[in-house]
Amino acid sequence: MTGTNYNVIYRGKVLEGFDFGTAKQNLMKMFSLSEEKAEKILKSRRVVLKKNVDETTAKKLGMALKKAGLDIALTTSQPKVVPPEATPVPPLEMEPRPKKERKEVPKPIEKKPASRTITPTYVRGVGLPSQIPFEFHGVGTEYFKIWLVNVLLTIVTLGFYSPWAKVRRKQYFYSNTHLQGASFEYLADPMKILKGRAIVVGIIVVHQALTSVAPIIGTIMGLAIIVVFPWVLVRSLAFNARNSAIRNIRFGFDGTVGEAAKVFMLWPILAAITLGILAPYAYFRQKKFVVENSSYGTTGFKFNATAGDYYGLILGALITIGIGVVAVFVASAFFPPAAFLFALALYLYGFAYYTVNTTNLLYNSTQLTPHRMKATLEMREFIGILVSNSIAIALTLGLFHPWARVRTLRYKVENLTFMASGDLDGFVAKEQKEVSALGEEMTDFLDFDFGL
């Protein structure tokens, strides 16, 4: 690498294959611009978007802008700035006009208002904080092959292959999820998962046998399983975290069994006793427990949401569902076939409402000190994906499932941004204890999922 500095220049046109509206939306999303500012940039004949940066930074930024649809050039000189067409120069750094036969005298750098400087979304070190979007590179056709092989081998081996199927599935989704050029990794050993599942199946078989032969002993054993549930949960979260990594740094989970018992057993019981009044608070405590006991290397996550946020979310859901239920009853009285359609629409809307709002609240309230997260899922877009996926799965008798899974995950990932306030390489991996796969496989067997 040389010491030459480069300028990143927009050459006044949108690349072939992109229309003006798409390029504008991409530019707005990348730099958090208003529509007016993005439009002014695209209508300009030549704008210096970044000047005097090193070669690596210039190439990364140039590639990102080309993917957004802008015609970009990198120069090592100070080219003449051509005035924009009929509009003032947008609020970006502009190149000074070169003087004839005159040496440039270094001048103090003039500070500009923060609102007039655009920080590239995923070029580290250009500005702080920078918005680093998550990317998903998975393809439905690729995942279909993995899914089909997993299903067939699991059936042929009577379930023996299922741990390998699980690891292959997770490795595919993890490896296709990227942050600033690095992909996530799933590192679990299928053999450990198989051993865990064998223990779980053995416990279930023994419990069923004792229940049929000696009901009292079977009941006592069932209660014992419930009592050890918090331990199972903590082991599950620790196993999943330790086997997830990015940039060779693993995640971690340090929650205690006692705290897990409070948030996943005591608070749900109190919610039931209060006829659901404490349910939003119990849900809030569960999310807080999972987030604040998780870590990336030696850095712990923080959770900034409040119980009031979850009460507002649940209240909104109840009002919407209540209106929907009334509509279903009215429709059933006058035109029964319409009741089914209303009920289906209510289910899809309720599922979308829950997914979008809980996801946005979770990530927008999560902080990896001093960094934070930002989720921007929207109801209209997610419902569109949900409806089209459902129709396609029904018409293909389930064969569209892999494509539906990829489409849904892509939408979620690409609406997630990491708001970096420092160097991501500054994290230091910490040593973590080996965690048995037993806990995770108990939750898998009982169809529980408590992961982030």
Image (tube, helix red, strand yellow):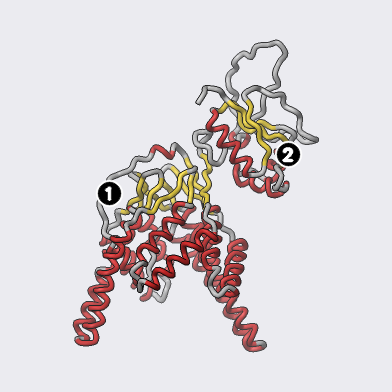
Work out how far the residue at label 2 is from the one at label 1, CA to CA, in angstroms.
52 Å
What is the x, y in percent for residue 183? 45, 48
Front-most of residues 380 and 210: 210
Q: Which residue is drawn at 68% across and 38% down?
A: 71
Front-most of residues 224 and 319: 224
Q: Residue at x 50, y 36 (%)?
A: 124
What is the x, y in percent for residue 9? 66, 32
- Sort mark 2 into few (<14), some (14-19) or many (20+) by Cα contacts within 10 Å: some
What is the x, y in percent for residue 449? 39, 65
The answer to whether residue 67 is above or below residue 314 is above
What is the x, y in percent for residue 28? 64, 45
Return the residue at label 2: 13
Amino acid beneath label 2: Lys
Secondary structure beneath dot 1 equals loop
Give the residue furthest to the right.
86
Instruction: Say how many tags the image has.
Output: 2
Q: Residue at x 62, y 28 (%)?
A: 7
Return the residue at label 1: 432
Q: Is the C terminus in the top left, top right, bottom left or bottom right quadrant?
A: bottom left
